Image (cartoon, helix red, strand yellow):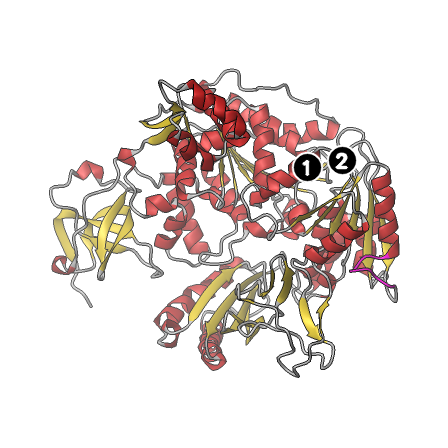
Amino acid sequence: MPTTSDCSQPFLRLALPVTLRRLFDYLPPVNCDASLLRPGIRLTVPFGRRKVTGILIETTSHSDYPVEKLKRAEHPQDQEAVITDDILQLCRWAASYYQYSLGDTLSQALPVMLRQGYDLAKEAHTCWRQAPDIDPAIIEKLSRAPRQQATWEIVKAHPKGATEVALKALGAEITLLKKLADKGLIETYTHIPEKRPFHSYNPILKTSELVLNHEQQQAFEAITCDANRFSTTLLHGVTGSGKTEVYLQAIHNTLKQQQQALVLVPEIGLTPQTLERFRNRFNVPVTVLHSGLNDRERLNGWLSAFHGEAGIIIGTRSSIFTPMPYLGLIIVDEEHDLSYKQQDSIRYSARDLAIYRGKLRNIPVMLGSATPSLESLHNAKNHRYRYQKLNQRAGNAKPPHMELVDIRGKQLNAGLSETVEQAIHQTLQRGEQALVFLNQRGYAPTLSCNECGHLLDCPQCDAHLTLHRTPPHLHCHHCDLQRPIPLQCPHCNSRHLAPVGQGTERSEEVLAKQFRNINVLRIDRDSTRRKTALSDMLSIIHKGEPAILVGTQMLAKGHHFPKVTLVVILNADSGFFSADFRGPEKVGQLLLQVAGRSGRSTRPGHVIIQTQFPENQQLQQLVTQGYDAFAEGLLVQRQSISLPPFGYMTLLTAEATHAHDAHQFLATVANHAQQTIQTQNLAGPMGVKALGPMPAAMEKRQGRYRMQLFLQGASRGSLHTLLNHLIPVMESSPLGRKIRWSVDVDPLEMG
């Protein structure tokens, strides 16, 4: 047991970006001004044989370790705290609730450049501006290069200069800037920007607000009546009901009080159109944060929020950790979306952290969705959340007509029934657009041998290799393994290999052949890898000419396509028969979100759902009675077996190159769990139980075998009591140091 130390000099207690769930004591830097040692600053410290960037949590006069055993920190990196008090509180709670180290949690809260020790004191921007003394002959030649000329015109329109981020937002092609500089047309210079606060912009609005209907007005008043105090409002609005307009007017009200607004969106794909709508409405700076930005862009956005320059932040999951000194409102759009839950490292829910952050700041939080999660509906039902419903679509738009098409025994053309083909043809003849939804990327789910029936599987995962045609290859979407398409079956050497099932590429190919003079646009993760690919396709769609959109769930969320009147869902059945108890909820939400892209303008919408199980009670209920009845039926089922939201779960996962090691590790944990349940009196009706270990739904992934142990309890308190006993056992286990293991509190994915 180490001898404790008390000393006239303070000790520094830091959180380090390591998996160990503890803080670390250090001596202060030599000749360091004590006033600089404030919680939330970064310090470089020695850790083993390397140096890491730690966050100062507190200074103390006491340490549990002898002073001669403590190492000395290096000079502070910051003049002011980069982890503000409220973000530190948020991260403390997240680390405790999700059973993760505080150091790694704080690391998640910072942009990569700050984690790597970037010096904020040197903060400056590289800007582009028109060069002096330009040769007119060069400008004349520029007309032969229209793309360069367009970018040149954008730079020229800003004589004081503009950053690459600003130029890109205005439509400039960043890759052409160097070419223009080589021609002597533009030049760079270093600019230390003024920090203009967002509330100095007047007027706040660029364009006037729309008139709210009665339901929208009620929702707006519900959120604004709680300004400057904590509340959570669930805005349940059918697709096309104008939830975004309610958000915009609530944000306007927040900005009028000189407060900032944070808007969380689930996908990168939603941010460009959301950003455009917000920037068209507001005169104050609107900043976007998501994983598609490079490190410099992300730091710039973080700084604009940190310094109070941005009035509105629009971001994906990790934006919940963005420091905003004047934060007055948090909005979580599509609150049901699974992408708000991180599936690696600290497995946090951004939606739930948004509610906790609202409570810390004593500000209102709005959750919006056309298909709210069962947890949020349950909380609204029990009056933990205020509930506001938008039943009618904005303007004159009507709900789409939904039709089930039985495809049992029918001849399909790459998954398309004759009914669907006729409906698409009629839609295009009317000058309208059709959307074909299929949640399967690639050309086909896999290849099969017609001779022996062998399926081409991934050698590293319990999954098929997906067939792609552009470019031709086989691809595992779980471990990213890629292989050329074989000429013969590896099992029987037959050359009769054929695609099984259909993916978006195959549907695109068939539709392009059938409708030769029509734009067929495929929107999935493969077709939108290029940075401007999605925005380019959306521009074509918004021109309003007849077109067919083929895509995955990227098309399901938030998009407004006024000319889309027909939505076709090719395979609606799989989620209803999933081993995951959340399967029906997920597929129901997805079907209605996709259906909601239809008939959002003046023309009526039509939704065709192909199914092999038209009598399925849940599918029938969803189509004929709507989401409310569907969700209520699921809640009744969940309550009968104490599943969330009527109980709580934690998923412990172990991964190892040998299945026996993963199983043995979790079996030991399960034994400790049973002992703890007995000794801590955690059994009984309100207690907890351990189930497993058992193989994961996909037992082998990325060459490692995965086992799971489920902990289930009727209360959060008892479940966390058990976890607090089990985590030290897992950390100290010799086997636990050889394998990978993780803790997922409130899991949304059971595979």
Percent x, y of residue 113: 35, 44
The secondary structure type at the circle numbered 2 is loop
Label 2, label 1: how many angstroms apart (C-alpha)?
A: 8 Å
Mark 2 vs 1, N-terminal side = 1
Q: Who is closer to the viewer here, 564 or 619?
A: 564
Residue 439 disc label: none
Residue holding disc 1: 540
Q: Is residue 416 magenta?
A: yes
Residue holding disc 2: 545
Q: Residue at x 47, y 78 (%)?
A: 671
Answer whether labels 2 and 1 touch (C-beta < 8 Å). Answer: yes
From which residue to which does the magenta span run? 411-417
Q: Quadrant of the N terminus?
A: bottom left
Name which residue type carries label 1: Ile
Q: Who is closer to the viewer here, 314 or 299?
A: 299
Q: Residue at x 52, y 44 (%)?
A: 316
Percent x, y of residue 660: 48, 82
Position of 99 relative to 464 (above/below) = above
Residue 374 placement, left or right of 142: right
Q: Quadrant of the C terminus?
A: bottom right
Q: Residue at x 53, y 48 (%)?
A: 352
Residue projecting furthest to the bottom = 492
Position of 371 relative to 167 (above/below) = below
Percent x, y of residue 368: 63, 40
Residue 214 placement, left or right of 254: right
Position of 584 relative to 44 (above/below) = below
